[in-house]
């Protein structure tokens, strides 16, 4: 079920007694939580609503609350945050002992007057686990991970229209680029844009350029473009700007390696018939990153991408094993890469 569909269910007061919100979009999580709380009258929230964090509280305590009848009301609402026991990993920082048998028993016989909602900020659950299988068999599953671009644009539009604002298509695209399509980052930027464009009620390109700072990934993506186009001067200038921004050389190189690895994966899998949506789920990356990668690989062949990737791997080895100046290492990489491309 999508985010929009679940909100409609909440509005119509027709939701299951158990729900799972899957994905790490904190903005959408908060929106869902706010809407769910409207199901309980304001004067009953204190007695009939509770929220538990599984990193600090046992699941047994949450289940005990969920099993209780509402106090002078018709419904009880219980949130369970960070239920890491549904995933394949353990939470090393948590010393809480979770008795999952209590949860398993509850899921087999949910309390009819309780709405129990699990907020799992993960890409997926471990389907091999008995507890995960039981949850999926009874819960309404709302997937807010890896939102597609049209969904993000619709959310932006709805958020702006609430205050009678509009955004130019070019400004919207620029906003997506500068935030790497991260909805939570976008929502954090909208208040500034609304304030700046208060008179016109129209968010334009100048407002986005002036107020929205590029993410580190976006800055590195610009650097990737300069590398691929063999624009040595621009590539070195962008690299220097990242260093001046106090980004560590190893971090810059690691993101570059990651970007070129993604470009290679997209290039190869596309040749095997993978679609944009399938690529995002297979590679477990944000759909917007896949979209940008698809636009990039159209203009470059696999051999060129391999040369850049292997060259950056070599830079990483030298950064870790020598005292050579990082900027000099990057300049040498650009010179060698450009020479290889010219003589290929």
Image (cartoon, rainbow, N blue to C red):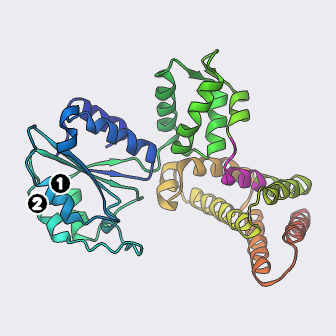
- Residue found 25% across the figure and 66% down from its top: 58
Q: Which label number is shown at residue 108?
A: 2
Task: Label 1: state its secondary structure.
Answer: helix
Residue 194 versus residue 309: which sits nearer the camera? Answer: 194
Question: Where residue 89 sits: x, y (%)?
Answer: 38, 72
Q: Give the range drawn in magenta.
A: 213-224
Residue 308 visible somewhere in the drawing:
yes
Q: Which label number is shown at residue 310?
A: none
22 displayed left or right of 72: right
Residue 134 versus residue 204: which sits nearer the camera? Answer: 204
| Residue under label 1 | 138
- Residue found 75% across the figure and 50% down from its top: 222
Quarter of the picture holding the C terminus = bottom right
C-alpha distance separating marks 1 and 2: 8 Å
341 displayed left or right of 143: right
Question: Where residue 109 sits: x, y (%)?
Answer: 8, 57
Q: Do the residues labelled 1 and 2 touch (CB within 8 Å)?
A: yes
- Residue found 47% across the figure and 37% down from its top: 151
Kindly give the residue lying farthest to the top in the view shown.
199
Overall secondary structure of the magenta section: helix
Question: Where residue 192 sits: x, y (%)?
Answer: 61, 32
């Amino acid at each position: 079920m999508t985010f929009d569909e679940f909100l409609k269910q909440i509005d119509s007061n027709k939701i299951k007694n158990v729900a799972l919100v899957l994905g790490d979009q904190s903005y959408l999580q908060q929106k869902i939580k706010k809407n769910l709380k409207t199901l309980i009258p304001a004067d009953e929230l204190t007695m009939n609503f509770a929220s538990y964090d599984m990193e600090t509280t046992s699941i047994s305590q949450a289940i005990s609350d969920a099993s209780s009848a509402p106090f002078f009301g018709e419904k009880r609402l219980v949130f369970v945050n960070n239920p890491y026991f549904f995933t394949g990993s353990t939470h090393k920082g948590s010393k809480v002992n979770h008795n999952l048998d209590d949860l398993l028993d509850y899921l087999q016989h949910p309390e009819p007057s309780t709405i129990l909602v699990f907020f799992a900020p993960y890409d997926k659950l471990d389907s091999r686990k008995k507890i995960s299988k039981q949850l999926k068999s009874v819960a309404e599953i709302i997937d807010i991970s890896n939102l597609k671009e049209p969904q993000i644009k619709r959310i932006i539009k709805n958020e702006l229209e609430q205050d009678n604002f509009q955004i130019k298509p070019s400004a919207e695209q620029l906003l997506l680029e500068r935030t790497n399509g991260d909805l939570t980052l976008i929502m954090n930027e909208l208040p500034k844009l609304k304030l700046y464009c208060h008179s016109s009620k129209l968010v334009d390109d100048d407002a986005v350029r002036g107020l929205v700072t590029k993410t580190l990934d976006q800055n590195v993506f610009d650097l990737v473009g300069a590398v691929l186009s063999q624009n040595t001067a621009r590539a070195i200038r962008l690299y220097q700007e990242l260093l001046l921004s106090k980004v560590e050389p190893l971090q810059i190189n690691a993101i570059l390696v990651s970007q070129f690895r993604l470009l290679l994966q997209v290039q190869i899998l596309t040749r095997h018939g993978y679609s944009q949506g399938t690529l995002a789920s297979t590679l477990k990356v944000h759909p917007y990153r896949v979209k940008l990668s698809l636009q990039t690989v159209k203009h470059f062949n696999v051999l060129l991408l391999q040369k850049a990737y292997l060259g950056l791997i070599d830079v990483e080895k030298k950064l870790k094993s020598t005292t050579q100046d990082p900027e000099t290492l990057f300049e040498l990489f650009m010179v060698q890469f450009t020479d290889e491309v010219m003589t290929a």
